[in-house]
Amino acid sequence: MIIGIDIGSTTTKAVAVQNGKIIKTVKTKAFDAVTSATGALGKLIIESNLNISSVKKIIITGAGAVNINNEIFGIETHKIDEITAIGLGGMFLSKKENVIISNIGTGTSIIEATKEKITHLGGTGIGGGTIIGLSKELIHSTTFENILRLADLGDLSKVDLLIEDISDSGISFLNNKSTASNFGKMLETANKEDIALGIINLVYQVIGVISVFAARSRNNDSVLITGNGSKNIIGRKILEEISQLYNIGFEFPPDAEFATAIGAALSES
Ligand SMILES: Nc1ncnc2c1ncn2[C@@H]1O[C@H](COP(=O)(O)OP(=O)(O)OP(=O)(O)O)[C@@H](O)[C@H]1O
Ligand SMILES: [Mg+2]
């Protein structure tokens, strides 16, 4: 059995892979690299009743990987760069050998993965961390569940300047409810719910549109969404709207938040 551990900026993910199949996944908060790696490994072993002696190797990736330089509990460790891990994990989850991946974590990276080559196309600092940070300051809310609960009740037209505010008809392929300017209206009567939705909308519209441009630049018509950001239900709806406008599909595979850890484990199995 091979274990892949992804020490991300916010959360640590670990997966156990045997014969090319995922047998267990776990998630924990990211602490210092050693605590993250040993904690995730311990959780994985205990929750799945596995025997630690059946672990052949541990492959580590993510922002915190540089800090692990030794064996963990006598098991050899290897490192793989995060971009390669996302590319391998994305190909595995999509079952495709030519895929554009938008990994929405604390920040967002966009990767083209083919059997021959894995390329970092670019990305943006806009990501899950932006949602948490702006929410903390603007609506005094820091838990993800709370932000989503508020946003679910929000009215975007109180926060965003919409096409209907500036034109009697749509503009080009945009419809009257499309955003003309994120936070460009910001009514004084906007409440926490409206602002929460405005924040999530800002983040997912930016990620959606740059993902579309990345896919188009590589002649691809779909984007695989990975990272914890793939699990944001409101974010998904915003990406679906962008998909309609731009004719690029977004895919949300199961286990998307573990894509990077899966890629790490698969790199040596
Ligand atoms: N239950 C949840 N559903 C969806 N998104 C969540 C959930 N909990 C946290 N998030 C968001 O996911 C982000 C972290 O995602 P993820 O774990 O993929 O990032 P990371 O790997 O730690 O960071 P990076 O890859 O950028 O180094 C947080 O900033 C938060 O906004
Ligand atoms: Mg990550």
Image: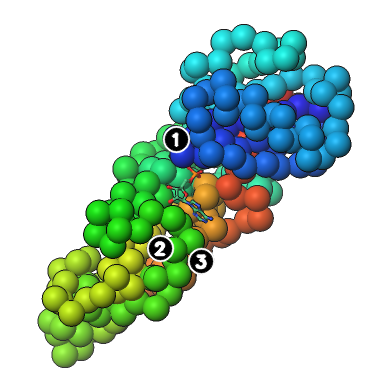
**Residue under circle 3?**
233
Mark 1: is the Cβ under 8 angstroms from ligand 1?
A: yes
Q: Nearer the viewer, residue 34 or 124?
A: 34
Residue under the point 78% across and 40% down: 47
Q: Is residue 214 visible?
A: no
Helix, strand or loop under label 2: helix
Q: Judge whether 14 appears above or below 233 on screen.
A: above
Q: Few, some or many C-alpha atoms within 10 Å of disc 3 (few <14, some 14-19, many ≥20)?
A: few
Q: CA distance from mark 3 to mark 1?
A: 22 Å
Three-letter code, disc 1: Ser
Q: Can you give x and y, in whole percent of width and height, for residue 66 in the image?
A: 49, 17
Instruction: Decide if residue 174 is on the left or right side of residue 219.
Output: left
Q: Can you give x and y, in whole percent of width and height, for residue 148 in the image?
A: 44, 66
**Residue under circle 1?**
9
Q: Can you give x and y, in whole percent of width and height, for residue 230 in the image?
A: 52, 55
**Residue under circle 2?**
147
Q: Nearer the viewer, residue 113 or 183?
A: 183
Q: Which numbered disc, 3 or 2, marks the residue that appears first in the sequence?
A: 2
Instruction: Decide if residue 227 is on the left or right side of residue 76.
Output: left
